[in-house]
Amino acid sequence: MENADAEYGGGGRAAPAAAALEAVVEPVVAVTDGTITYANGAAREAFDLSEDERADETGAGNWDAATGFESWSRLEAAIDETTVGTVRHVTLEGDADGYDARVHRSADGATVTFTRTTAETGAVGETESIGESDRAIKDRAINEAPVGITIADPDREDTSLVYVNDAFQEITGYSYDEVVGQNCRFLQGPDSSEDVIAEMAAAIDAKRPITVELKNYRSDGTEFWNEVTIAPVRDEAGVVTHYVGFQNDVTTRKEAELALERRTAELEYILERVEGLIQDVTDVIAGSTARSELEAEVCDRIAVESTYEGAWIGERNPATETVDVRTGAGRYPETGVSATADHPAATALAENAATTDTLEGTTHASFPLSYNGIEYGVLTVCTDRDRAIDERETVILSALARAVASGVNARETSRVLETDAVVAVEVALTDSSVAPVALSAAADCRLEYRRSVHRTDDETASLFTVTGADATADALEAAVADVPDLECRVIVERDGECLIELSGGDDLVGWLSERGVRTQAIESDDGRARLTLEIPRSANVRSVVEAIEDRYSGTDVISFEQRDRDSETRQEFAARLENDLTERQFGALQRAYLSGYFEWPRPMTGEELAQSMGISRPTFHEHLRTAEAKLSRAFFEEDQSSG
């Protein structure tokens, strides 16, 4: 070990290293050839080293080690056995000195740092608790502080550590002997921020305090986030003699902050990218006039998004057990996929749920196109990006798929009114939730569907003619009282027949209409109804029928028939009606219309019109009413009769 002047300085005032050791609360001495050449304040107080023997004011001196310590023989043996440049821990338990020691060996001697092990020592005739002294209280406070504390000496090579407290050892997993004499950078690792490290170095060079957060590594290699505060310690002359460091494990808080930052960044990323996509797809849905156009434009819009490689819409093909491609853009399987394959598109259709999987390095996310229980296919997007399609993006794309399905449903529903190519399906129902089934079971009557109208509250009211023994207002009202939520209004009552309006309860006709199905006929008696439905051939007829079977128990499919609707032009309809009217009936209807008779107020009376035809007023009204009846029958019924 170097001599005291070289090691700790001299020259009339405490050198920086000596000043630092004066601040250390543990006793520290330098020993060379059995002589104590330096003792800090804590050592001089603890071991009662005579002030008179001090050579100067720096702590340097010339004390006999054997006289200063009862345990000198054990310390001397440890010094001799310690290899130069290493540290040895010496247990002095049971000695009168009441300390353990750490021996730091150099070429010329050793530095010994003492750790208190017993509670009591003192002068002759007096017992004093060292633990209650000011220095011992500071010692205990630093050692028991809940944050790591280090002291580094800038005058030592690489600004190495000269002290660490217990909390530092607990936080890092390194022992005192492993770290004293090293620069604190041993805590850094591959993911420690170079910018933060440079920031700390700049603060140390500028001799100013700094607080940073840095990823550090424990002795076992595990990572932790360290809130590090470094502050310079200056002597009375303002010279920096040491740096004190405070380490606080903030891993839990930091990970929560980083997780929040990641979630926020992901949300902003998704919103920025998907918001425009949703708006564009919504515009496509609103502006397209046909299903094929809608589907193609949706796939095109998704495929041009920079984070997606492609998009396609497929449809289940029961005959081939495949999911066939209806349209696609960018990257997509032009031949489709097997309906039984381990592919997200097949799984999404089978489970009616969004499904994501990675196949051959490409992520496929598939979303069923389903609306009101009717399956319209599956939308699949593909991406090779590093960022996975997470839960938030899945929710957004699922909503987009529902919007597409709603648009397809609207196109298919409108096609039922426009197309002549339909599939006529006859089914039988016995489900008592269906109003005509329940009413025909509760009363001895037969119901025949006439027409439905949509009210302002979106409820559908259906007109039925009722025949049979119970075709009276009183009997029907009594029967309806036993059917929950069903309302029945008798519009016209004749002998053995009533015209009624049914509303409330299960809205069968409205439910079918929302799925693009036209109800042609409903005939119900004795708790059983037979329905004739028309579904566009372009629609997924199988899916519609399955939806009916799922919704209504006791459903039997009677027949399927592809056919074309009878198309009749306006001129053909007018010619047929004119042929059905007599000359007087046609004349009365034509004169009434052309003269404004159906307007209000009427510019001409019935009597004036009768006179213009040269007939009596009662005769004119008879011809007019008969013509009106034939016109109504031609509009509302398929079969007309002359008369």
Image (tube, grey):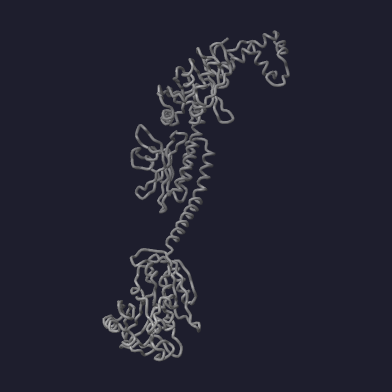
Picture quarter with the N terminus:
bottom left
Camera-side residue of 607 and 492: 492
Horizontal side of residue 1 vs 590, given as left or right? left
Residue at the image point whose x is 35% and y is 79% from the top:
114
* Along the line of sight, the residue nearer the viewer: 485 or 53: 53
Q: Hey, which residue is sitting farthest front in the picture?
A: 125
Say which of 642 and 10 sits in front.
10
Q: How many marks?
A: 0
Rendered location of residue 311, percent (x, y)? 43, 44
Judge whether 497 appears above or below 536 on screen: above
Of the 4 image quadrants, the one containing the C terminus is top right
Q: Residue at x 50, y 82 (%)?
A: 238
Residue 585 image point, x, y percent: 63, 12
Q: Is residue 222 above or below residue 24?
A: above
Q: Is residue 60 above or below residue 605?
A: below
Q: Is residue 88 visible?
A: no
Q: Relative to the observer, which residue lies in front, 450 or 592?
A: 450
Answer left or right for 609 relative to 529. right
Does residue 62 appear anywhere in the picture? yes
Residue 618 in the image, given as x and y percentages of width and height: 68, 9
